[in-house]
Amino acid sequence: MDLGETAVKAKAFSYFRAATIDQALDAHARAGDDARFIAGGQSLVPALSLRLQAPRLLIDITHIGELRGVRREGDALRIGALTRHCEMLSEPLIAEFAPLLHAAAPFVAHPAIRNRGTFGGSVALADPASEFPAMTLALDAEIEIAGLSGRRRVKADDFFIDLFETALEPGELITAVYVPLFRADQRFAFDELARRRGDYALVGCGMLATCTGERIDDIRISFFSVGNTPTRVKGVEATLIGARLDAERIAAAQGALEGDLAPPEGDEVPPSMRLHLARVLLGRLLGRLGEGA
Amino acid sequence: MSAPLTSLDRPNSYIGRALPRPNAKRLLAGRGRYVSDLKLPRMLYAAFLRSPHAHAKIVSIKIDEACAREGVHLVATGADLAKICTPWTGTLDHFKGMTSAPQLPLPLDRVVWAGQAVVAVVAESRAIAEDALELIEVDYEDLPVVVDIDGARKADGPLVNPGSANNTCFRSQLDSGVVDDAFAHAAHVVEEEFSFGRHTAVTLEPRAIIADYDPSAGMLTVHHGTQTPYQFQDLYSRHYNIPEARVRVIATDIGGSFGMKLHVYHEDMAVVGLSILLGRPVKYVADRMESFVSDIHARDHRVRARVALDAKGEILAMDVLDLTAIGAFSTYPRTSVVEGNQVIRLIGAPYRFKNYRATLEVIFQNKVQTSQYRAVGHPIACAVTERLVDMAASKLGLDPFAIRAQNVIPDDAYPQTSPTGYRFEALSHQACLKRLHEMMGYDALRAEQADLRKRGIYRGIGIAAFVEITNPSPAFYGVGGARISSQDGAILSLTPSGEVRCLISVTEQGQGTEAIISQIVADQLGLAQECVKVITGDTEVTPHGGATWACRGAGIGGETALQATRALKRNILEIAALILQEQPSALDILDGEIVDASTRNPRLPIAEIARIAYFRSDTLPPGTQAQLTVSHHFAPQGYPFAFTNGIQGCSLEVDVETGFIKLLKHFIVEDCGRVINPMLVDEQLRGGIVQGLGAALFEECRYSDTGQLMNGSLADYLVPMPMEMPDIVIAHVETPTADTELGAKGVGEAGTAAASACVLNAVNDAIAPFDATISSIPITPAKVLKALKRF
Ligand SMILES: Cc1cc2nc3c(=O)[nH]c(=O)nc-3n(C[C@H](O)[C@H](O)[C@H](O)COP(=O)(O)OP(=O)(O)OC[C@H]3O[C@@H](n4cnc5c(N)ncnc54)[C@H](O)[C@@H]3O)c2cc1C
């Protein structure tokens, strides 16, 4: 394409490359919050090109060293906001200590997008159809946020508020996500139903269970593409705690799903169908979890 | 395989050989010359403000602010362009009684679909033009919207064209034999109502055009990503009143077309006008969102059909009603009724029954126009026919292969005329059926299916026979008054170095037109393929012809090249005979050498003939004028179309809990007559099948009840992707047409023609144990689960 002239579709904006978190926060404030942080750009750039968003200023956060890297901190894994989707696949610490994220990553878009898209960007955007935001719920992760008034940590359970609405205040930045280290007494399972590989799923689910032998002591199950936010199904979880995963128990869990999910009216997928698919997926994943997958 | 045209072990025997396309490397290396890439001096960029309403009155348009924006050169409305462009109407005379409203580049007072271009802005960059669009204010007054087929046919419902009696564009009826009688006496009748989702071509490169009007020369040059430069030369000339010789249309590399780039688009016509108004080159490239709402769509059909059979499973009669909605206008110049016309004429085509009745009703609605897209009408005709045949088979307890074997026109019974009036020269259904049965390992597949069913795994096997229309004669468009040629022309020159330049009217869209033409020329002349340069797609350079559509490139363009080459060869041998003091008939050409025809001993390099003719004509006998350039035209005669045939098969698995379908393997046996290049033929079949599989499972333009396209982006409109595509196994039967020396027919649409029918049959086969059926394409998980009553 004749890039210079034909393909420029976004509205004109200014660009600032921040070297530090403070610079980024500052620039945002000075733009009167008519600004966007840009990380991988895999969601923001399409929105700009479609002129769905037209901020005055883009603040490039990809050169802020503090937002990078994956490391152990105590009994948690600190995953820097700039960690790319592809690193979820290649980083050994993720595979070992956050295997649920490792399992989810191949389902996030396609290689070209995974090479650029970031974990922090995905969580900040909080697309209810996205894999990673939902997995932060299953993992009982904490999101670390930097703002002009300082740093704070928010539990994933409290982070996702409504459609594309999170606990982030305007101008705040996600710096990292803390995930409790995966343990030997834990099991996980992940899968999704997408029309084509790499598409946003019609419904998807990830779960993390802590077990004593075959008995489930604790379980967190999180769905995506089922409503306005990534959704933990606490009613279902309650049916499973203290139980063994036999056919009867799985059927009971599937039966409880209706109480936890209220899929919205969709253009192509009616709520009853989404609920049905969620039930099927839940059954299959619990089956795998029972087999020790 | 038929006997080759030339013995394949001879040097330069290229016809029938799998050879890579000479231009593939260039395109892969990024050296393509697409209109999207092209930049001309002083070029400006157009962008269009589009209607957000499916049907509305334009009350007022305020453009002052946009005009005042820095970098904006022109803001044009419908009225501005109507002053210089005459309107067009998408009707053809041979479709008796069809109507369509006249069209202009931009509307004057009413918009008729959401996404229709309303105002054009020309600016120094596309970005500036887009900014200026936001400064334009259009005041609309909503009008009642006609969205679906039922709404359009309601007696007192809203009208797409106020003042007309109804929303009917065209009605047609076929009736032959004794249909009522056959149904009255039939042992079995099966009946179904089918629906087919609208879909669209989704070319990699969207529509692209640069119009460059030079007022000093009164000359219009248009760089246009189209299959048919000659058609557009004619149209631009007539609608903008510029002498034809002063209109040049150049169509170089194109990033896909599939029929979509054959048609007149409002924006393209507007861009020509904008360039005339400004006296500067103006470029417009549709972006993806614009493509979805302005490229032609296709296949919006609802078909009710029934078939009558005797007690043994012999098909006696078919009775069909096809309702199709085509948007607010019939597309110009090829109309939007060809698809429906081909649906009702192709239904039942592989089979021998004689009693047939069909009604076609073509309906206006407030959506973007539909028109010819790869395999025009075929997938619908094939799905309707082949699903009914399968339904009949299961009713009678016959195997799908058996019922087809019983009913296809036997291979030795040609020529035949179908009850719909199509004349078949020679087809090979029996041979294809037999070959497919072996190739699929059909009996083993059935055994495996039965086994897996016991374990709760639901596999389906589907087959679908088809007939494809190729090599159209003037019966297709010419008789209807369209200035669309069915002949092709070639100009061949022997260059001074003894190579060949071939200018030919068929065009290249990446399918390998230039490759096969160079194969034919090299083969027929006796030259290495590298010594043949083929040039296409420039009306100033290449002779007028039909170009590329309806699978005519190889059959008609190829024959043109063959005959032109033979003429050039005669001329070369005449000069050679004079030089060698031989009879021309005693000489031949082999691998660039004039040889003795009987002994094959080399006598003189062909380059030497060229040298003498061009530089030492003084050494030739007095009175000799060497004619080393020949021009030749070829128009198909004999059969009005060269029909081809084939059969496809597939195996798939339905997840009966999720409704997801996994395609396991796809098969095709195809008969396109003489195969010029097996590799390119297979590429066409594979690509065509994938497009058909997209239609079967994924592609659909979904509209809201207010006429808004709901999924007009590649995130929401699902095209087939490699991960979901099965392996495709291909075999050929060759029945060359005797209408030409070359014997080639078309192949570009065969894959698309039957792929969706095949999947439809296989899915129904898979869910048969649940007494569930599906008759709607695309087959989405929602439709499968609905059929299985899972939610
Ligand atoms: C074709 C395609 C398919 C895709 N498929 C999927 C899929 O299947 N599943 C899926 O989950 N995603 C998918 N995506 C989206 C992709 O994963 C995005 O990369 C991701 O959602 C956003 O990450 P990013 O780094 O690209 O963010 P950007 O696009 O740069 O930013 C997204 C938003 O987050 C904000 N933001 C970014 N980083 C931070 C931060 N550290 N703190 C605060 N705010 C921040 C930005 O201001 C912006 O508003 C797809 C994208 C494309 C283009």
Image: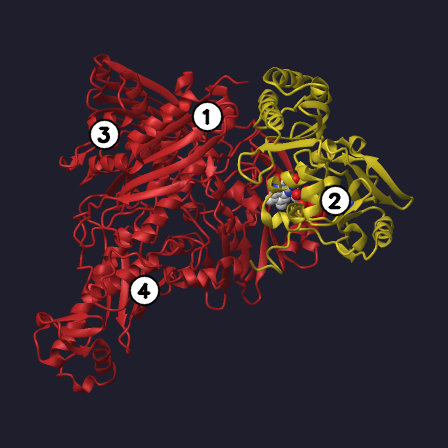
- Kindly identify which chain the residue marked by label 4 belongs to: B
Whole-Å distance between the Cαs marked 2 and 3?
Answer: 61 Å
Judged by depth in the image, the label closer to the viewer, 4 or 3, is 3
Q: Are marks 2 and 3 in contact (CB under 8 Å)?
A: no
Whole-Å distance between the Cαs marked 1 and 4?
Answer: 46 Å
Chain B shade: red
Residue B351 badge:
3
Residue B703: horizontal and vertical position, in percent?
Answer: 54, 31
**Which residue position holds label 1?**
B149
| Residue in view at x 30 percent, y 32 percent | B442
Chain A shade: yellow
Q: Nearer the viewer, residue A290 or B282?
A: A290
Pointer 2 and pointer 1 on the same chain: no
| Residue in view at x 12 percent, y 79 percent | B578
Within 8 Å: ligand 1 and the Cβ of disc 1? no
**Which residue position holds label 2?**
A120
Residue A23 shown left or right of residue A48 in the figure: right
Residue B503 badge:
4
- The three-letter amino acid code for the residue at tag 4 is Leu
| Residue in view at x 27 percent, y 68 percent | B528
User: Which type of secondary structure does the marked residue at label 4 adopt?
Assistant: strand
Within 8 Å: ligand 1 and the Cβ of disc 2? yes
- The three-letter amino acid code for the residue at tag 1 is Ile
Quadrant containing the C terminus of chain B is top right
Residue A39 shown left or right of residue B568 in the figure: right
Residue B384: horizontal and vertical position, in percent?
Answer: 34, 27
